[in-house]
Amino acid sequence: MKILVADDEKNIRDSIMDFLKLEEMDVLAAENGFSARRMLESEVFQAAVIDLKMPGMDGLELLKWIQEEGPAIPVIMISAYGDITDAVAAMKLGARDYIVKPFDPEELVIRLKRIIENQELKERMELGKREAPGFEDWICKSPGMMEIKKFIEKIAPTPSTVLITGESGTGKEIIARTIHRLSPGAGEPFVDINIGGVPENLLESELFGYEKGAFTGADSRKIGMFELASSGTLFLDEIGDMPIHLQVKLLRVIQERKIQRLGGTQSIPIDARIIATTNKNLEDRLKQGLFREDLFYRLNVIRIEVPPIRERREDIPVLAGHFIKKFNKIMGKIVCGIEPEALECLQSYGFPGNVRELENIIERAVILVEKDIISINDLGITVKIQKFRIKKGTLDQVQKQTIVEALMRWEGNRTRTAKELGITRKTLLNKIKEYGLE
Ligand SMILES: Nc1ncnc2c1ncn2[C@@H]1O[C@H](COP(=O)(O)OP(=O)(O)OP(=O)(O)O)[C@@H](O)[C@H]1O
Ligand SMILES: [Mg+2]
């Protein structure tokens, strides 16, 4: 923990410094406002103790700068007996506390610790609040998704761990946020960590936090995400990427509902609801030994499998409408809808990027459209897709045409084409040969 002390009187500076060092705090001292500001600009502090009266830039000016442009750290002001009006002004400017000279350094330490603790609490609350206004509505219409919706409403109020699986862009994260919103912890933090996005050596300390001195460089306590999410939701995105040794620890946390900070000895109770997602096939990773079986079964109790959008085409019109409204608002446009032909075109597209891709297509269309309705040319995907045509001909001809169209939608990708057509890859390869499509 690093503290800045700014006072022009050397003996006061020194005595505060000595005392804080006894408490194992790092202290840097400045003899006036200007040098204090320079230090605040170049180093990270957890709090500052500032004398009101200093030559040059005084304490009030320094405080004002901190509040307006400087780092968001709590400040304690030191005022001389008789400077109470200035001390009041300082509190109005945002100082967290003030102490009157002469003071007992021990008293200062107590107050300093208190405001640093409060600051941590405040940061935690802000983490929670950040979520509130950003909520996006989760839209669905297809029978499959309506089932999921009902399921979500049922499980949201429980504390159970949830596993959400599905291809990239199917809406796993927005479902996790919806569950949080419907849960008793809705007003509490939704803390989100992308397991694959955090370097492996940092992941453990991000999740569990650490005590001061746990390792070189751990110069103050850090609260981990399990604790930050307390009473709320901890969202473990891409859990398939979690290293095996942390999977063991995670399993233990889920079972025991307790953690220990790195380097700590105390068990801290955890009440955050855990929601995990993955777009990887966990069953496959299980077989490859990359995912622990016991953790998988523990997570798999409440499982939501989000289907790709090509398997729930009834959702396309409502989602398109939803995104048109969303981007109208963001871009100040008044697009009122989408031409039937363009909608048909979307209905027959494969959407390898799922809802995210649909959202991007609509965003682009809302930017480009010149009339007030989106036409096929605004979609930018016409090259990839073939327009829907009523198929006529013998059964064989219809089958061939269906396969050709599906292959074009998937740009020749056999596996995805087979999946869409509901046949095995082998059958598809046979058909391709049979019809001479290569
Ligand atoms: N049913 C839905 N209603 C409204 N918006 C949706 C819906 N499904 C997905 N979206 C939107 O589509 C985008 C992608 O969704 P999201 O990020 O939840 O996908 P994901 O499954 O987590 O993807 P990835 O695996 O790539 O992380 C987001 O902008 C999300 O808001
Ligand atoms: Mg995601």
Image: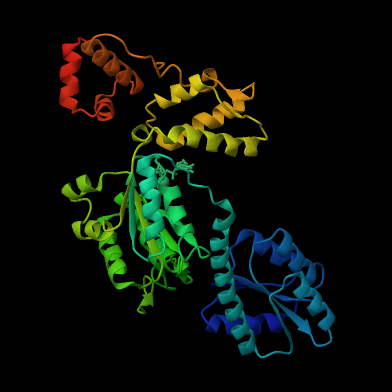
Q: Is residue 92 left or right of residue 155?
A: right
Residue 26 found in image quarter: bottom right
Q: Is residue 328 above or below residue 216?
A: above
Identified at 39% across, 54% down, the residue is: 152
Q: Is residue 97 above or below residue 341?
A: below
Give the total number of marks visible in the rendering.
0
The quarter in which the C terminus is drawn is: top left
Identified at 51% across, 65% down, the residue is: 188
Q: Is residue 65 left or right of residue 230?
A: right
Percent coordinates x, y for residue 419 in the rendering? 25, 30
Identified at 53% across, 64% down, the residue is: 187
Can residue 40 be seen here? Answer: yes
Specify the quarter for ligand 1. Answer: top left
Percent coordinates x, y for residue 237 in the rendering? 38, 51
Question: Camera-side residue: 88 or 258?
Answer: 258
Q: Is residue 115 left or right of residue 353?
A: right
Can residue 438 be seen here? Answer: no
Percent coordinates x, y for residue 133 in the rendering? 59, 54
Question: Camera-side residue: 337 or 215?
Answer: 337
Color scheme of the displayed model: rainbow
Identified at 39% across, 52% down, the residue is: 150
Question: Camera-side residue: 142 or 329?
Answer: 142
Q: Is residue 181 left or right of residue 57?
A: left
